[in-house]
Image: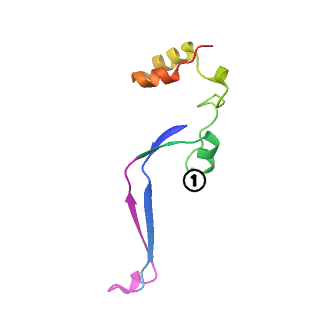
Amino acid sequence: MIFTAVPIDAYSYSVVASPTASEVGTTLQINIPRDFATYTVTRNFFNEHNGALADVVSAVMPRTLGQVKTYPTEATKASLISTYGVSRRGFHQRLTHTR
């Protein structure tokens, strides 16, 4: 899987002093987003580390890494492009495999 994400540095602070007494003892969290990054991971790795997000099921990417015959054919490529209207040329080239 190749995906793009925005990593977030999360900092938690315990409030030990405040002019508002009810804030003492609470936790303040600050999230600072970094620049987006592109990652390449296996579907299993993604699913094991995606927290509460939905898993990516095998039907989404029905291929086996390194087993060329499990990759999309020209017909599959054409069907996906027709269905989803993908028009980025580089994506088309990477999606294609002829058996």
In this rendered view, identify the residue nearer to me: 44 or 40: 40
Question: Which residue is located at x 49 percent, y 40 percent?
Answer: 3
Asked whether residue 99 is drawn in magenta, I would say: no
Visible residue check, residue 14 = yes
Question: Which residue is located at x 32 percent, y 86 percent?
Answer: 19
Quadrant of residue 58 within the rendered picture: top right
Q: Amino acid at mark 1?
A: Gly
Picture coordinates of residue 66 (x, y %)? 65, 29
Quadrant of residue 47 within the rendered picture: top right
In this rendered view, identify the residue nearer to me: 10 or 16: 10
Visible residue check, residue 86 = no
Dot 1 corresponds to which residue? 51
Can you say whether 49 is above or below 12 in the image? Answer: above
The quadrant of the picture occupied by the C terminus is: top right
Quadrant of residue 89 within the rendered picture: top left
The reply, left or right, for residue 97 in relation to residue 4 is: right
Picture coordinates of residue 14 (x, y %)? 45, 78
Picture coordinates of residue 79 (x, y %)? 52, 16
Picture coordinates of residue 24 (x, y %)? 42, 84
Can you say whether 20 is above or below 75 in the image? Answer: below
Q: Residues within 10 Å of mark 1 (few under 14, many from 20)?
A: few
Asked whether residue 21 is drawn in magenta, I would say: yes
Q: Residue furthest left?
A: 19
Q: Residue furthest front?
A: 66
The reply, left or right, for residue 29 in relation to residue 52 is: left
Callout 1 secondary element: loop
Can you say whether 1 is above or below 32 in the image? Answer: above
The quadrant of the picture occupied by the N terminus is: top right
Colour mode of the rendering: rainbow
Question: Which residue is located at x 59 percent, y 51 percent?
Answer: 49
The reply, left or right, for residue 69 in relation to residue 90 is: right
- The part of the chain drawn in magenta is 17-36
